[in-house]
Amino acid sequence: MALRTAAASLTWCAAPDEEVELTTKQKKEFVRPEDERLPIGATIGYGIQHVLTMYGGIIAPPLIIGQMAGLKPGEIGVLIAACLFMGGLATILQTVGVPFFGSQLPLVQGVSFSGVATMGAIVTSGGGLPAVFGSVIAASVIGLLIAPVFATVIRFFPPVVTGTVITTIGLSLLPVAAGWIMGTGENTGGAKGGAPENLMLAGITLVIVLILSKIPVGAISRLAILLSIVLGTIVAVFLGKADFSKVGEGDIFALPQIFGFGMPTFEIASIISMLIVILVTLTETTADILAVSEIVGTKVDSKRIAAGLRADMLSSAVSPIFGTFTQSAFAQNVGLVAITGVKSRFVVTAGGGVLVILGLLPVLGRVVGAIPTPVLGGAGLVLFGSVAASGIRTLAKVEYRDNMNLVIVATSIAVGMLPIAVPTIYEQMPAWFVTIFHSGISSAAVVAILLNLLFNHLGSVKRKNAFVSAPTRSIPVAYLDAFEDGDSIIDGKIVDREGNEVTVERPAH
């Protein structure tokens, strides 16, 4: 059972005319887990950990698109800096939130990889980067308008769907970790498989993660990923696998350029193709919001999802002004929330601030960029595996008797794994089909939603998912007095903030 704050799981059952006076302790019980505020040092440390986790993912799209557009290395560097800067602003908007914008969940935002193929096609077809920026602006504005309608699909996301999607997110990210372990360029050792020194470096980092996670000191175990990356990089230096010699080359400080790659142009065909990417992005962000809310143990409704999607679309619409692309929640960081147990959204806000600084200080970005990818891969194995494990835990709550839920899970995960197992499987299909189904996450989500509709909503009442039709439970408000700040419910047991089980005294008969 996913971790849930005790107070957030309780429904009051006081009489309609009864006036309930809350004590200060009871009010604290209703604070959302994601609203926790940590000491400034811990907040910044955990924020940097989030940045290191997603850094490789956020610089990959501008690197690929820049190369396809024929940009020079210096111009590609400007493109990457813009992506870091805008990703930081989008993250701050998503986590802090303003009226109607921002889910206020620990979600890191960055350039969505789902649009790389489409943007590459626009660039190479003659439109260039201006056509890409124009299509992103137009499609994102449309996405902003339809976000509230799109958010109403939450009722079609019971555990059988969310568990499937979360599991697929984790599994689809594992090839990313494998690619990091393999390395790039000369780091591959010129071999078809991973170079032995890369595998060894990744293995050392993985072992460090496991050892640090076992240490019974919260400050160390929660920072296990960050510390393992630092220590793994130090090991890489001694092995000659890390090169920081180019860190000093280039500007130390640089402001983002407004329309630095030209004014956007608006082409109908490009906008239509980008709109499909936006729909996929909305689907993936919805899945990430539900995934992180499940891990955090907080409640989300259609209004909160709509606010998160609006933040995505607003950030995407503004991004081309600074020379970058569509923004989306990063699934990698959902795994970091799961493995560390740090649920505070303000930690991710700090990470957003670090991204903004990296976007303004290219020298810091070059430092982070010099971290050997096998080190990131070793840590990524734990991170991404944790996402899949969280999905499996959610699927354990699903009722599989007298219904088709097992078929829904099996089929959805299998379809989601196809583009992961064979990335070229859909190459001969139409472009719109490839855009939707080339992502294992979006394809699994689409199949799970459709099958759940078919078997659990359009079918007979007797075959409905037990979690869809389950009656609302309630607990007397007087029981709140027994709970203390930090108490949670895990697998049906009450535990305190330190994870120790609280004894339940049963009345004598």
Image (cartoon, helix red, strand yellow):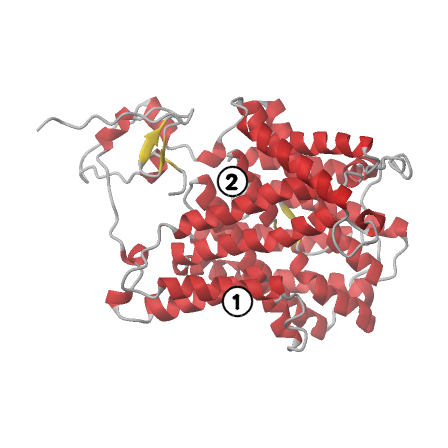
Q: Nearer the viewer, residue 478 or 144?
A: 478
Residue designated by label 2? 338
Q: Quadrant of the N terminus?
A: top left
Left of 284 or right of it: where is 509?
left
Task: Check the image and name the residue furthest to the left.
Answer: 509
Q: Is residue 504 above or below residue 337?
A: above
Q: Nearer the viewer, mark 2 or mark 1?
A: 1
Amino acid carrying label 2: it is Ala
Q: Residue at 71% x, 47% y: name it.
A: 181
Q: Which mark is residue 272?
A: none
Amino acid carrying label 1: it is Val
Q: Residue at 62% x, 66% y: name it.
A: 438
Residue 482: % across, % down: 27, 25
Q: Quadrant of the C terminus?
A: top left
Would residue 94 be visible to someone looking at this image? no
Residue designated by label 1? 415
Q: Nearer the viewer, residue 121 or 209?
A: 209
Query: Upstream in the sequence, badge 2 or badge 1?
Result: 2
Report which quarter residue 122 is drawn in. Answer: bottom right
* Element carrying mark 1: helix
